[in-house]
Image: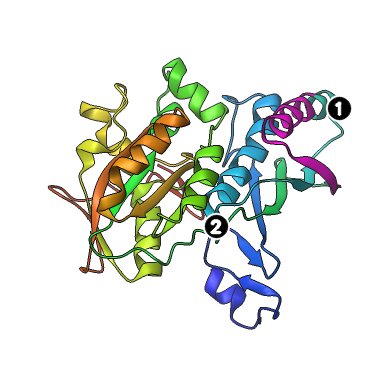
Amino acid sequence: MIATLLAPLRAPANVAVGPGDDAAILADGTALTVDALVEGVHWDARLNAEDVGFKTLAVSVSDLASVGAKPAWALLTLALPDEDLGWVSDFARGLAAACERWGVALVGGDTVFTPGPKLVSLTLGGPCVASPMLRSAAKPGHIVWATGSPGLASLGWRLSDPPQEALDALRRPDPPVEFALALARTGWVGAAMDLSDGLERDLPRLCAASGVGCVIDPDRVGRHRLLVDEHWANAVSGGDEYQLLFTTPPERAQDVRELADSFDVWVTPIGTCDDSGAARLTDRAWPGASFRHFGGRS
């Protein structure tokens, strides 16, 4: 789909990093990203309007953080089937809370009618704090790291009666922004990307961009107490993470742990890059991704 869209287009000269990473990078170091959320696909009744407003910004903040850019300003489009001012007011409160949390100014946008479900699209921009972290610089021997508890948010979606912790993760994503910016400043990172569609879908993208393979220990992913036994597959295949997936040389392992501790961020070494060209688990097959952009959730 994306390749077909981009085929006839040419990136202008003032774009340093074009399509293929989590954000475009202009020649002046400004990072830009855009995301869309559709009712019934990206949220349902488990999220109220305030949650949707908060999450609308959080998912884009995660993209900018993954390239080492500080979120600064946003443009918003709302496509709504009716003038439900109560929903819009609640949505605005959630969005305002997220803007305050991450220091983002809403500087414009558009509102339109749609006969279908609600659609929210947000464009986010901000400056890179150092050389951008991209998907394309992992090397064989690098450690693969993941922040947070991959799979916890999607557990909130998959279970009919999910635990409150899983619901909280689904409703209010918490990307490790300050840690990601500090990590970018160190220069330790090989490759990095936003972990949002689940490890099973996102890791092969990093491998393809870097020309490497990876072997992942599934027992080290999603070490939250809710993601054991029958829910292990959710840790490696679930989406809605909005965490950071990155690689570093092994000699930086202790440095990474100490930096993460200083920001109270949970970071786990989940595997190692190699020269196989494939992303695989140590002792089992991938269980099947739980979310596809044109296939919905399973």
- What residue sits 49% from the left and 22% below the top? 167
Q: Residues within 10 Å of mark 1 (few under 14, many from 20)?
A: few
Secondary structure that dominates the magenta span: helix
| Nearest to the observer: residue 155 or residue 215 | 215
- What residue sits 32% from the left and 37% below the top? 235
Residue stretch rendered in magenta on the structure: 90-110
Residue under pointer 2:
22
* Vertical position of residue 250 compared to residue 18: above or below: above
* Vertical position of residue 242 compared to residue 155: above or below: below
Quadrant location, the N terminus: bottom right
- Cα separation between marks 2 and 1: 33 Å
Q: Confirm whether the magenta stretch covers residue 108.
A: yes
- What residue sits 56% from the left and 47% below the top? 65
- What residue sits 22% from the left and 69% below the top? 275
State the image coordinates of residue 251 (x, y, percent, origin top left): 26, 51
Residue under pointer 1:
85
